[in-house]
Image (tube, rainbow, N blue to C red):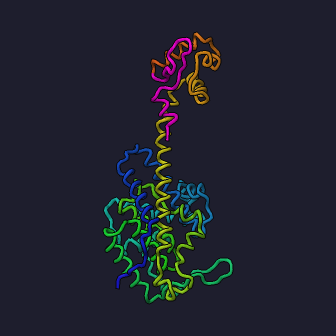
Amino acid sequence: MVWMPKYTITQAILRNLSEIEAIKNYFADKVFSPSLVSSLRQSAKIAQTHYSTRIEGNRLTLNQVETALYTADKSARSYQGHDEKEVRAYYEAINYMEKYLNDGGIFSLALIKKIHSLIMGSHKIIPYRNAQNAVYDSADGSIIYLPPETKDVAKMMRDLAAWVKDNIDKLPPPVVAGLFHYQFVTIHPYFDGNGRTARLITSFIMRKSGYDLQGLCILEEYYAKNLSTYYQALMTHPHHNYYFGRNNADLTPWLAYFIEGVSQTFADIKAKTAEQVHSTKVLPALRNLNLKQKKILGLLKEFAEITSIQAGLCLGISPQSARLLLNKWKGEGFLKIVNTPKKNRTYGLSDEYEELLFPRG
């Protein structure tokens, strides 16, 4: 029988789904420079590698992960420790997933197995676990979670894959991705690498359905920022044994947590790209200003309007010379006259420069 998760789409979930959809559409219509998108995607991949492995105990910082990934010396790479090899394996799995997506690949059990093997640094497909495993509390060694028995794993994985395929076009893709994430770590089909595989396949489902914000969306930072909340959301039933509650638990709290995370992440990425786009316009504009114009710009940051006397004092020239210079810059489109009478004439940034350098909202 195909897996049938129990959950409710609450008003909060519905509101977050609406916000997710709005930002998705915003990115679908937005045209960014290829160089900007490429740079942001690369940063996202490094961050995704860092946070997903960090959740599992990897000790490398974000900068150390980048160093491990881009060490040019092959002999030096061969001497890297476990943490470095782990992040390189995860990064390779991301690259495989991206190529698979670009080639039109679809969700399948075969994809899950391939991604898991790459994450584990294996060139061969690793079979499902053949014995019982458990999740233990690192503090006292007690069992936090006892997954399904080995005999049930293969069928549960088939049921999960069938559910995703049956529902990806019926339900909002973030809902499908979130429920997949939960059920995969619940099944815990492998001895190791379950969390990393769950997060990367969740990413695949989102991207395949167009919820990737041009390849910039990563959810791993959201989980990693508050690990206790992440794990608490996954523990949908107080009993540690799968067969005593978690097999029939209400997944609404987990889904609410997951969808809120997608919404927050989308909003953060929208804000970040807006800042980056603004920077790509502002920096060339600033480089085109000469030293005197930059000084006047500094003065206009303090005063919205300036007189020729203020400009002369700022530049160390006479008010008459400053007036000539200000009028010249007006003609070049850098400044505009705000108050026109000659006796009390004031100058401000032109509308173009004001919007560029000091955007409103």
- Percent x, y of residue 52: 53, 65
Displayed quadrant of residue 170: bottom left
The answer to whether 208 appears left or right of 51 in the picture is left
- Percent x, y of residue 156: 41, 83
Q: Nearer the viewer, residue 287 or 322?
A: 322
56 in relation to 44, above or below? below
- What's the residue at 52%, 35% (across, down)? 358
- What's the residue at 36%, 73% (across, down)? 164
Displayed quadrant of residue 2: bottom left
311 in relation to 67, above or below? above
Q: Nearer the viewer, residue 347 or 67?
A: 347
Residue 275 visible in the snapshot: yes
- Percent x, y of residue 11: 44, 66
| Label tally | 0
What residue range appears in magenta?
333-361
- Percent x, y of residue 333: 45, 23
Displayed quadrant of residue 216: bottom left
- What's the residue at 51%, 34% (across, down)? 357
